[in-house]
Image (cartoon, rainbow, N blue to C red):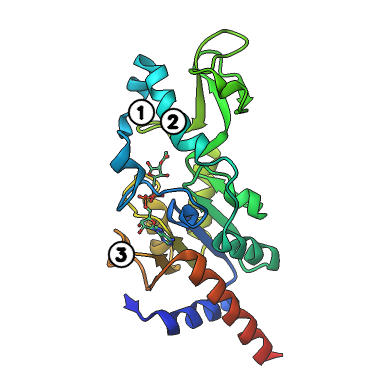
Amino acid sequence: MLTNTQSFVEKAAQLILDSNYTCAFTGAGISAESGIPPFRGEGGLWSKYNPEVLEMNFFFAHPLASWTVIKEIFYNFFTGVSPNHAHLALADWEHKGYLQSLITQNIDQLHFKAGNKEVYSFHGNSSQLICISCHQSVEATPNLLSVLPPLCNICGCVLKPDFIFFGEGIPEEAYRQSVKAAQKSQLFFIIGTSGEVSPANQIPVIAKESGAVIIEINKDKSLYTNRISDFFIQGKAGDILPEINQFILQTKAKTL
Ligand code: OAD
């Protein structure tokens, strides 16, 4: 594993131009510069809140207590947030044919808002709620969340966010597509994720074992850094991704 930010940014640009299938795998760090705090590390959500609110047993036993925190974390923080330079760079890459797919652990919808289309939401999404009894799916509107816990208008049972809680299975289609993308990747970016949550943290390992070159972008070292990353570019995603873009433009200009 090599680290040397400036030349690796240049190298990343060249690898993107040479790759026939590039995939990005993102975590909470990519949304930090949009104002959404990550889960772990300094100022992380799990240092302020008890993660038990995302455990099914706790949710079933204490829906109001669980929802009070869930609303604060996942709905108040997400209100009015916009994609940052990192999200926009990835959308640009997809648009220009440099990025074939994007796997995200984030439930904030910011990759969709930025314009990416080929996105696999590994942990589900926060924009829909699902009834724990009749499984009706409804949009998570401010009106519905004004009284907690929100209830199903068909059967009256509690509604749960349509993202996964600890111990719940990964949405089947997102899992299947993510594994397929990892296996096909020639180039695989790991951006802003600690690598602490399983089974999501196995997806980059699948990419590595399938022969992809792994480029990691993170403010700090992660569980991937000294294990599977071929290149570690240390810095904020919102700075590094636009820098890579600059080098792509320069490299292309040279070859014209
Ligand atoms: P974490 O909070 O565990 O990790 C965030 C990572 O982003 C850390 O490695 C930080 O160093 C890095 N980071 C922070 N700011 C950054 C920036 N501006 N640029 C680049 N990197 C930055 O978040 P995840 O790995 O995404 O699950 O956590 C995985 C899952 O754990 C989440 O999807 C969530 C949580 O429990 C669910 O909500 C189901």
Q: Is residue 197 above or below residue 241?
A: above
Rendered location of residue 100, percent (x, y)? 61, 61
- 75 sits to left or right of 200: right
Dot 1 falls on a residue whose secondary structure is: helix
Whole-number angstrom distance, CA of label 1 to CA of label 3: 28 Å
Q: Residue furthest top?
A: 155
Q: Which mark is residue 221?
A: 3
Percent coordinates x, y for residue 183 in the rendering: 48, 58
Q: Quadrant of residue 218?
A: bottom left
Location of mark 2 (residue): 70
Nearest the viewer among 244 and 226 is: 244
Q: Amino acid at mark 1?
A: Val
Q: Residue at x 36, y 33 (%)?
A: 166
Report the residue at 50% width, 82% height from top: 10
Check disc 1 and report the residue beneath it. 53
* Left or right of 65 in this view: 24: right
